[in-house]
Amino acid sequence: MSAATLSRPLTLALSKGRIFDETLPLLAAAGIEVTEDPEKSRKLILPTSQADVRVVLVRATDVPTYVEQGGADIGVAGLDVLLEHGGAGLYQPLDLRIARCRMSVATRVDFDYAAAVRQGSRIRVATKYTQIARQHFADKGVHVDLIKLYGSMELAPLTGLADAIVDLVSTGSTLKANQLVEVERIMDISSRLVVNQAALKLRREAVRRLIDAFARATEARSS
Ligand code: PRT
Ligand code: MG
């Protein structure tokens, strides 16, 4: 960690949308107000009410990379994103219990998933989450051909590209709108605090203070 990195404000990486929205109240509870609305401004670096803390906006999937490489000291990332990234080199001190959803297998209503599994058929699975899917089906001993997609997974079973998808489900309305059914729940997902290892050592006090504030805010919310 360079001298320039050490003298900059403590940098928190967030993604726009649900993670930003759900992290704001936790920051506020820690006495940190983000003074600009990312939906209205094009700025990627947002100051806060504390001169020594700032927020940088990155793509959700880029948060682990920013924090691992020291582009940010701390970040908030979904467990899905962390598992796909690998998370090596990241300290993960806290489950913030925000942006909650689940990772599931879904198919068309007319696809008999249980029978395909029972018969040991090869199942074509389309997903953005290839690491999680590979691990899940390997654990079950199910043979799959994984098809990597970057979005609109729901379309794959409808067009015959795949038999099943592995995707995040929250309310279930996206699956329903596309006449898909959830046939297996793989894991519960929530967002985690991730911390750069060097920052943890070299900026120990500031980093600890922020982690503790997040921990208190998370506790206060769930009780
Ligand atoms: O959207 P973008 O491509 O910019 O990036 P992203 O999708 O990675 O970011 P974002 O902000 O959409 O998601 C950030 C994190 O929020 C994810 O990594 C998850 O950990 C978490 N999260 C929680 C979700 C959902 N809930 C969720 N419902 N992420 C995505 N979804 C999507 C899901 O993929 C599906 O398309 O919402 C749709 C299903 O929602 P329901 O309510 O219809 O079931
Ligand atoms: Mg999204």
Image (tube, helix red, strand yellow):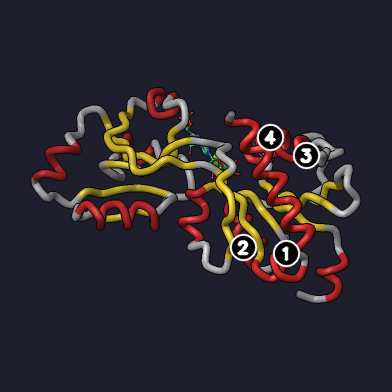
Sequence-earlier tag: 3 or 1: 3
Q: CA distance from mark 3 to mark 2?
A: 21 Å
Q: Position of residue 41 (x, y in %)?
A: 83, 39
**Disc 4 marks which residue?**
21
Q: Are marks 3 and 2 in contact (CB under 8 Å)?
A: no
**Relative to the observer, which residue lies in front, 36 or 218?**
218
Query: Which residue shows up at 82% across the image and 41% down it?
Result: 32
**Relative to the observer, which residue lies in front, 96 or 60?**
96
Q: Is residue 130 left or right of residue 51?
A: left
**Disc 3 marks which residue?**
38
Q: CA distance from mark 3 to mark 1?
A: 19 Å
**Disc 2 marks which residue?**
65
As displayed, is residue 40 above or below residue 59? above
Sequence-earlier tag: 3 or 2: 3
**Relative to the observer, which residue lies in front, 172 or 88?**
88
Q: Are marks 2 and 1 in contact (CB under 8 Å)?
A: yes
Name the image quarter holding the N terminus: bottom right
Amino acid marked by disc 1: Gly
Q: CA distance from mark 2 to mark 1?
A: 8 Å
Sequence-earlier tag: 2 or 1: 2
Q: Residues within 10 Å of mark 4 (few under 14, many from 20)?
A: some
Sequence-earlier tag: 2 or 4: 4
Sequence-earlier tag: 1 or 4: 4
Determine the image quadrant of residue 105.
top left
Query: Which residue shows up at 48% across the image and 44% down it?
Result: 151
Q: Are marks 2 and 4 in contact (CB under 8 Å)?
A: no
Q: Position of residue 64 (x, y in %)?
A: 60, 59
